[in-house]
Image (cartoon, rainbow, N blue to C red):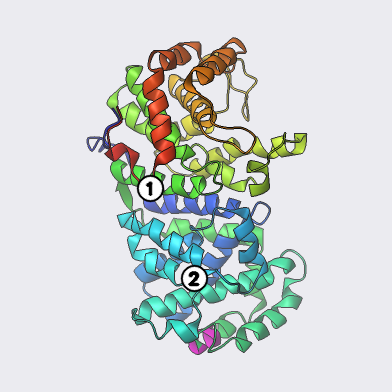
Amino acid sequence: MIHSPDRRLTSIAIDLGQAIHALSDALDLVGVDEVFHGKRVGFMVTQCGLALGLGAKELGDLFHAALLHDCGVSSTHVHCYLVNELDWEGSEQHCIKGSELLDQFPPLAHLAPLIRYHHSHWDALHRLDISESVARLSNLIYLVDRVDALAKPHYERDLLLARHAIRETVSGLSGSLFAPELVALFLNVSASEAFWLSLESRHLIRFIYEREEECHPILISFPELRQLALLFAQVVDAKSPYTMRHSLGVAQLARFLAERAGLSSETCAKIEVAGLLHDLGKLQVPDAILEKHGALTLEERAIIQRHSFETYQILRGIAGLEDITLWAAYHHETPDGRGYPFQRRGAELTVEMRIIAVADVFEALAQQRPYRESLPPDEILEMLRAFVREGRLDGVLVELVGRYLQEIWQIALAASALEPGFDPAAQSVA
């Protein structure tokens, strides 16, 4: 049986701001080679917010909304529209999805309206029954978001020369896509060369670092952390129909195995969170690779093998999450040391890391893939035992799978059938 979050884990608290930056890092990976979109939008919207005279709280919320504005985007195909097209049919869909995700997490739910309308045209937006503040600030995010799309071909090259054409394009959309007063504000804020030079990667990183230093920590509890991890998992699992709900399934299986292995209730709860977060780095893998029907090339396999390292880099900036970070990032390490990306071996791999590795393989084999159907439980167990003989999985844990094979199989099936937004730990699984 998988339990509800243990609310006694009050000793674990993390800074929400650090978690938001981690999620922003994950979202930026969807761009594959274009990985600073959310942060550039955050910089530009902050400069405009300062010119508007926003207070510290409203400015902070605007900055966080900018970092998370594309949380409804998991697909590299959709991301191509975001950075290559000024406007397109269906652009509202990722706004709706993103706002629904944030609505599920109370500490960030107040940002959902800004996400919901950040691709709405001003000539329609200002007629909707929403607050003036939501209309104005969401349209401001839209404006600078489109500026970044226009600037994309020119970063690190000829941005200073291109800025005049970008400003002219924005000016021409005043009153249609963008509020006239926001266009005037942007044209004033972006008049200097310094504004545009600040968008280059090395300067942008400095801005983000300084912005983090200025923010006061907002601590969230372990149950809230778990809710946030569920949000992260939904973003990752939405990347492809073939990985749908994979993170949720791994989290359930890992917790089940941890409980059967006799680990403490606190460790079992934390290992579930690690399972939810283990594949964050997979957002950088192009859709075409995940959905390929044939064998992967060496180049494609090398791209896949980056993802657990990216998971590590995303999570390592969250203080208090150190053990969960390693458990999540080491899920492709093997007892014989031939795993990736750190090539840890033997005693370097804790039981928690080994549990997530076993859960990940079982869940993957139980799911349909573009190159094969879902495998039956007995066949999965035989494959797991073969991996033990090859030094790739922990033998004790695989035999634990064998002891509870039907229960674990039912958990995997249940995970595959879950609706988006479903909270697996709020239910019991026989």
> For the residue marked with disc 1, what is the amino acid?
Leu
> Where the C terminus falls, by quadrant?
top left
Magenta stretch prevailing secondary structure: helix
Q: Which secondary structure, mark 2?
A: helix
Instruction: Please tell me whether mark 2 or mark 1 is closer to you in this view.
Output: 1
On screen, residue 400 above or below 146: above
Residue 177 in percent (x, y) is at 54, 82
| x 53%, y 49%: residue | 26
Residue 299 in percent (x, y) is at 76, 38
Query: Which residue is denoted by mark 2 in the rendering?
Result: 46
Residue 141 in percent (x, y) is at 50, 72
Query: Which residue is denoted by mark 1 in the rendering?
Result: 228
Give the camera-side residue of 5 and 97: 97
- 128 relative position to 142: left or right: left
What's the magenta region? Answer: 180-185
> Where the N terminus falls, by quadrant?
top left
> For the residue marked with disc 2, what is the amino acid?
Thr
Q: Residue 410: in sight, yes or no? A: yes
Q: Which secondary structure, mark 1?
A: helix
Give the camera-side residue of 223 and 204: 223
In the rendered structure, are the residues bearing label 2 and label 1 in contact, judged by CB atoms less than 8 Å apart?
no
- 177 relative position to 213: left or right: right
